[in-house]
């Protein structure tokens, strides 16, 4: 019986070691995909937020159309980056208020 338990313990340890090495390989393989996945995740957050507030989506779409027609692309890009930062800041503040 002890031999059987020892064999099982040895097999268990081998499986644990194999799983650990597979996790390391998987982590290295996923590294190039990390940035695209983060972008996709953030995009989904924005879509979910706008689905929750459709009037806001209409306003942002209208404002975007007006700004694109009036501003140059480079200035609009800078404005869009600033807007995104403000959006994230407001979202984080709202979440922290809800937690308190």
Image (tube, grey):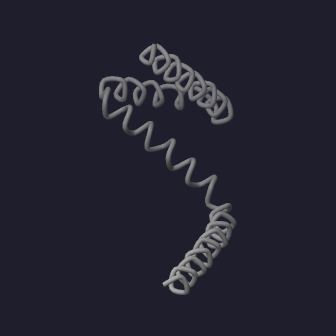
Residue at (45% x, 24% y) in the render:
63
Q: Residue 85 at what x, y percent from top left?
A: 60, 26
* Number of disc labels: 0
Q: Residue 92 at what x, y percent from top left?
A: 53, 23
Left or right: residue 20 versus residue 88 is right
Q: Residue 89 at what x, y percent from top left?
A: 57, 21
* Viewer-closest of 46 and 82: 46
* Viewer-closest of 27 and 53: 27
| Farthest-out residue, front | 1
* Viewer-closest of 10 and 27: 10
Left or right: residue 53 versus residue 85 is left
Residue at (43% x, 44% y) in the render:
44
Q: Residue 45 at what x, y percent from top left?
A: 44, 38
Residue at (34% x, 28% y) in the render:
58
Residue at (50% x, 18% y) in the render:
96
* Viewer-closest of 12 and 30: 12
């Amino acid at each position: 019986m002890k031999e059987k338990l020892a064999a099982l313990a040895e097999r268990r340890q081998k499986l644990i070691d194999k799983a650990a090495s597979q996790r390391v390989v998987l982590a290295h393989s996923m590294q190039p995909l990390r940035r695209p996945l983060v972008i996709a995740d953030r995009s989904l957050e924005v879509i979910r937020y706008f689905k929750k507030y459709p009037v806001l989506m209409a306003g942002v779409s209208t404002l975007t159309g007006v700004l694109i027609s009036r501003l140059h692309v480079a200035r609009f890009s800078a404005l869009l980056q600033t807007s995104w930062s403000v959006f994230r800041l407001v979202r984080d503040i709202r979440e922290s208020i809800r937690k308190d």
